[in-house]
Amino acid sequence: MEMKLEVVVIPVGDVERAKSFYEGLGWRPDGDFAVDEGFRVVQFTPPGSSCSIIFGTGVSSAAPGSAQGLYLVVQDIHEARAELLGDGVEVSEVFHDVSGVFNRPGTEGREPGPDAGRRSYLSFASFSDPDGNEWVLQEITERFPGR
């Protein structure tokens, strides 16, 4: 049976501030649904993605900013970083991981610059939304077989 990741919940403290941030990234606004004062859902989809994010009021009990390691796959890490900087987002320098794989919180294991061979899956940059939810850009130029 096929299963597709459709939506990821992002915990935020200020819905309007988050909405403005994701609009500023050029993400597609899919909806803003207020049922009552205690329940509002805002949905955005990154360009080219099949998966959306939602945030709002009453949609998560997680602490605002507690989402970590949300990956955005890009074709060119430098171009993606430059675009985000142009949108006014504070983005880390491009980095790679000393182990050759990056799945760690924080900055542990980060080495400056892209992977020396610019191998697919191994170059990264990161940024956070205004609440501190962490996004990781991962450069994938060629997918491994079966993906």
Image (cartoon, grey):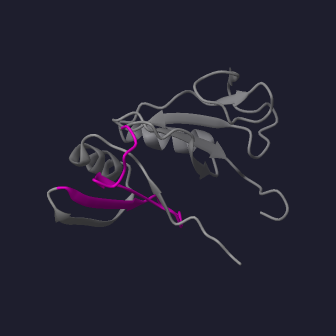
Residue sitting farthest toward the bottom = 1
Tell me the residue at 61%/30% (across/down).
94
In the rendered structure, the answer to whether residue 75 lies left or right of residue 143 reads: left
Viewer-closest of 19 and 139:
19
x%, y% of residue 28?
Answer: 37, 63
Residue most toward the right? 145
Q: Residue at 83% across / 65% down in the picture?
A: 146
- Look at the image and say whether residue 108 sits in the magenta stretch: no
Indicate left or right for 38 with 135 as reference.
Answer: left
The percent position of residue 76, horizontal first and vertical second, equals 63, 46
Residue farthest along the left direction in this orientation: 37
Task: Answer left or right for 126 relative to 12.
Answer: right
Q: Nearer the viewer, residue 105 or 145?
A: 105
Asked if 34 appears above or below 81 in the picture, the reply is: below
Q: Position of residue 4 (x, y in %)?
A: 61, 69
Highlighted magenta segment, given as a residue range = 38-63
Residue 57 in the magenta stretch? The answer is yes
**Quadrant the N terminus occupies:** bottom right
Q: How many marks?
A: 0
Give the image quarter of residue 101.
top right
Residue drawn at (64%, 71%) of the image: 3
The residue drawn where x is 52% and y is 38% is: 68
Could you tell me residue 17's position as x and y percent?
24, 43
